[in-house]
Amino acid sequence: MSFILNAGSPIGQPNAALQIRTGSRDVIAAGTVITADSRNLELQLAHLRVVLEFVTDGSSTRMESGPSNASALNLRLYNFNNSIGSGTTSPIEIGTLAGRKLWFAFMVYALSPESSKTVHYTFMAGD
């Protein structure tokens, strides 16, 4: 089966349009980052900065919201340091973007508490 696409830039070009939807939400940004170390990761999307702070305290895996303001969301991720991954079980609502609800989902993988983290992330907009 083949499709003929007549809109936008040709596939393979830097400006080729790709739209992704999941459920009733539009994926507006997604990717994978390997951190330089085991400390914070900052993601900036439009006016909002999301900071993932990795903390190891030998207890259970959990997430807490740290001090935040209108343009920054700080998430403290405790013990997100295993190779099978830890993250959100469903997207979490974190704010609004262009009048739409903004959602965030992520998974973190690490070989040890001191190692770099591999972070898969997705930002979605919906109603």
Image: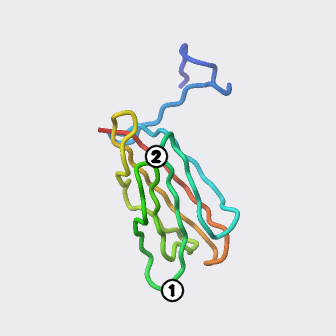
Q: Quadrant of residue 21?
A: top left
Q: Quadrant of residue 5?
A: top right
- Residue 94 lies, in percent from the top left, at 38, 51
Front residue of 47/17: it is 47
- Residue 93 lies, in percent from the top left, at 35, 51
Q: Residue placed at 57% from the left, 48% from the top?
A: 31
Q: Secondary structure at mark 2?
A: strand
| Left or right of residue 44, residue 91 in this image | left
Instruction: Indicate how the structure is coloured in the image.
Output: rainbow
The single residue placed furthest to the right in the displayed view is 36
Front residue of 30/47: it is 47
Residue 64 vs 123, above or below: the answer is below
Residue neighbourhood size for the residue with mark 1, other residues' Cα within 10 Å, grouped as few (<14), some (14–19), many (≥20): few
The single residue placed furthest to the top in the displayed view is 6
Residue 111 vs 119, above or below: the answer is below
What is the spatial separation of the Cα atoms under label 2 and label 1, in whole angstroms?
A: 30 Å
Question: Mark 2 sits on what residue?
Answer: 123
Residue neighbourhood size for the residue with mark 2, other residues' Cα within 10 Å, grouped as few (<14), some (14–19), many (≥20): many
- Which numbered disc, 2 or 1, marks the residue that appears first in the sequence? 1
Res. 58 mark:
1
Q: Secondary structure at mark 1?
A: loop
Task: Say which amino acid is labelled 2.
Answer: Phe
